[in-house]
Structures are given as C-alpha cells and as structure tokens.
Image (tube, rainbow, N blue to C red):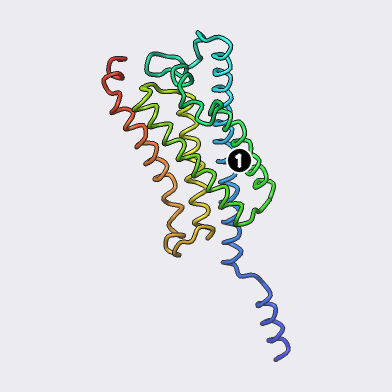
Amino acid sequence: HMSVEQSTQEHNEDTPSASGSADSLESQSSERSLAVWLMVTATVALASSAMLVHERLQIFIDAGHSSLCDINALLNCGTVLRTPQAELFGFPNPFIGLVAFPILMTIAMGTLAGARYKKWFWLATNAGLGAAVVFVLWLWFETTFVINALCLFCMIVWVMTIIMFVKVTIRNIVEGVIPASEQVRQSATGWTWFSILLLVLLIFGIIIIRFFNVFMGMM
C-alpha cells in the first residue's frame, strides 16, 4: 500500500496543477489577442503613413498639389505637411512610420507563430511606443494650437499609436515585465479600453473645443 501511495504522490507532484495550466492557456490567449491588435493597428497606421508619404512627395513635385485629405481650411493635410513641424528630423515624419510599423507587424506575426520574446524585448517595445506617444502628443499640440489645421491621416496614426502603446503597457504590467503589485497586475486588463478612450477623448475633446466655432460653421 505504501508503494502505491508513494507512486501516486510522486505522480501528483510531477503533474502540473489545473490552475497553472489554466493560467498558461489564458496567457497564451492574451498574447494572441495582443498580437492581433498589434497587427491590425500597425497595418492601419502603416497605410496612413504611406498615404502621407505619397502626398508629401506629390507636394515636392508640385507645390500647388491638392492632397487627398484637403477637405477644407481646417481639415487640410496639405497645410500640415508643408510646415516645419512635419519634418522635425530633417525628413518627412511619416517616413518614421514606414520603418516603425512594419517592425510592430513583425512582432505580431512572430507572436501569432508562437514566438516568445524576452523581458528586455518587451521593455524596448514599450519604450519605443512610449516615445511614439510623446511625439504624437507634440504633433497634436502643434497642429491644434500652432498650425491651426488638422490632418486626417495623421490623426488615424495618432489613434493607432495610442492603442498599441496602452495594450503593450497593460500586457507588460500583467506579465510582470513592468513592476507592479499583485492587485494592480490582476486589475490592469480591465483598464485597457478605459485608458485608450480617456486619451483619445482628451485629445479630440480639446480639438473640438479649440475649433468649436469652425465645426459649427461647417453644419
């Protein structure tokens, strides 16, 4: 009897617990979900960046070119693309997106294929997206309060960048990449869309207030 009990005990010790297995499956599902969101948002952002590059090249060729998203005096990509702010580093800003967004798409594809990245890799990704959000906020301020014109494709990139940043940040908190208490880690996922909506509403809410009379004049 002792032999059977010892064998059973050894078997139980070697077998992963049901809760551990469930946590692993939940983590894998969460990673796949993040990968899908990264793929979708990075693809949309890349397409918008490509359109901005195309429009900027057209302006280089023809100074009087009317951009695809030149809707009126306020919603006017051409106005924004002709400003110094649109070439902060000496070349059109959208070129950054042509490099950065395919990298994020590659990360997403790797995750969907089963790749698992190191902690430093996720921290680097988070830092890169954090820098992108800071750049987005600067561009938002400049277009809203200095240039006084809005770029449709630019704003699409802004929203996609915010979604990617928040989702990767929440993922890193949950997985322990970013240090946080157990309570914060467990509740972080529930704050994902609240955080995204808060940032988006803050940005566009201020835009609406800033140009309220202009918007009312369009109606």
Pick the quarter of the image with the C terminus: top left
Q: Is residue 62 above or below residue 211?
A: above
Pick the quarter of the image with the N terminus: bottom right
Place residue 102 in its image quadrant: top right
Q: How many numbered marks have been drawn onto this rendered protein structure?
A: 1
Where does residue 192 sit, x and y in percent of width and height?
Answer: 44, 47
Quick one: which residue is furthest to the bottom in this view?
Answer: 2
Where does residue 150 sit, x and y in percent of width and height?
Answer: 41, 23
Residue closest to the eye, 65 or 106 = 65
Residue identified by numbered label 1: 104
Quick one: which residue is furthest to the front in this view?
Answer: 90
Residue closest to the eye, 30 or 208 = 208
Place residue 22 in its image quadrant: bottom right
Residue closest to the eye, 119 or 61 = 61
The amino acid on which the numbered mark 1 sits, given as a three-letter code, is Leu
Say which element carries label 1: helix
Q: Is residue 129 above or below residue 184?
A: above
Where does residue 43 sit, x and y in percent of width and height?
Answer: 59, 32
Residue occupying image coordinates x 49% and y 50%: 169
Q: Is residue 144 above or below residue 35?
A: above
Place residue 141 in its image quadrant: top left
Where does residue 151 sit, x and y in percent of width and height?
Answer: 44, 23
Residue closest to the eye, 111 or 203 = 203
Q: Is residue 30 left or right of residue 133?
A: right
Q: Is residue 180 left or right of residue 90?
A: left
Residue occupying image coordinates x 46% and y 33%: 158
Residue occupying image coordinates x 57% and y 41%: 38
